[in-house]
Amino acid sequence: MNTENLIKELSFKAIRSSGPGGQHANKVSSKIELTFDLDNSTELNDEQKTLLLKNLENRLTKENILILFCDQTRSQHKNKEIVIDRFLDIINNGLKKPKVRKATKISKSAIRKRLEKKKQLAFKKALRQKPNID
């Protein structure tokens, strides 16, 4: 996967940032909206697309489009760099395959130790009872 070609598939839109900021914020579009169409991506193969669909299902829209926003700074260019870095992190983390869990068996010594402790605790509690006088 070539990140430069992947970045070329992104589309950006500049929007007015929300919140306070005075006169300057009301006339400058510094917030960046990044959209990435996963289905129509030519840089990713089918295996990568299915892996991303599974791992990013809660971040994708119904049309399998990833949308990210950034309005951290007052600069449009810095916000664009930040959102691209965030996008690449999301894609790289989404492409990681989880480790296959190997079933392990509890060792016989661990079972024996647990049962011995259980017997000791039962004996200790039995000593706390009132003596049975018959």
Image: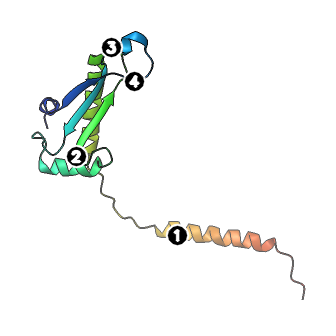
Is 35 drawn above or below residue 129 in the view shown? above
Query: Which residue lies most toward the bottom here?
Result: 134
Which quadrant of the structure image shows residue 25? Answer: top left
Q: Give the left or right position of residue 96, taking residue 113 as reference.
A: left
Alpha carbon distance from label 1 to label 2: 49 Å
Is 51 drawn above or below residue 14 in the view shown? below
Residue 45, image x, y percentages: 11, 46
Mark 3 surroundings within 10 Å by alpha-carbon count, few (fewer than 14), some (14 through 19), many (20 or more)? few
User: Where's the N terminus, which quadrant?
Assistant: top left
Q: Earlier in the sequence, mark 2 or mark 4?
A: 4
Q: Earlier in the sequence, mark 1 or mark 2?
A: 2
Residue identified by numbered label 2:
64
Residue identified by numbered label 4:
18
Of the residues tagged 2 and 4, which is closer to the observer? 4
Tag 3 secondary structure: loop
Q: Earlier in the sequence, mark 1 or mark 3?
A: 3
Which residue occupies 58% across, 67% down? Answer: 114
- Say what amino acid the circle numbered 3 marks: Lys
**In front: 10, or 82?**
10
Residue identified by numbered label 3:
27
